[in-house]
Image (cartoon, rainbow, N blue to C red):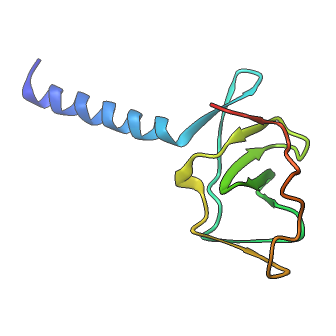
Amino acid sequence: MTAKKNIMLAGLLSTGMLTGCLLVPERHGEAMLLAPPLPPLVVLETEPYYVQGGYHYHYQNDNWYYSRSRSGPWNNLPRDRYPREVRYKDGGHGYDKGHKPEHRGR
């Protein structure tokens, strides 16, 4: 191969690898769904759930999970999609920390 073709191939592979980092597999049929990032600041109500763009997010023990439904199944949200800050509307943790929806680890 020529040097020009090598550079083009390297560029295509790099682009494909970067795009692949944004996709998170979700076992909803065979589809690969993109896990949308949360905004920089998330304010939670009395329960540790947040809804945005058709996705449900659950916050537990400093970890975030996402699903298309509040009843799950839940997937780990990649850390690059976490908010920078989490606040609680009532100024504290107005929910039972023992509540644990069923999460799927990856």
Residue 30: % across, % down: 71, 21
Residue at left 8%, top 28%?
3
Q: Nearer the viewer, residue 16 or 88?
A: 88
**Which quadrant of the view contains residue 28?**
top right
Q: Nearer the viewer, residue 11 or 4?
A: 11
Residue at left 60%, top 36%?
24
Residue 68: % across, % down: 81, 43
Residue 84: % across, % down: 57, 68
Farthest residue toward the left?
A: 3
Please identify the quadrant where the C terminus is shown.
top right
Viewed as shown, does residue 98 lie left or right of 104?
right
Above or below — where is 97 with respect to 92? above
Residue at left 70%, top 54%?
61
Q: Nearer the viewer, residue 83 or 96?
A: 96
Residue 15: % across, % down: 36, 38
Residue at left 81%, top 51%?
56
Farthest residue toward the bottom?
A: 91
Above or below — where is 18 with respect to 82? above
Please identify the quadrant where the N terminus is shown.
top left
Above or below — where is 52 with respect to 92? above
Viewed as shown, does residue 43 lie left or right of 40?
right
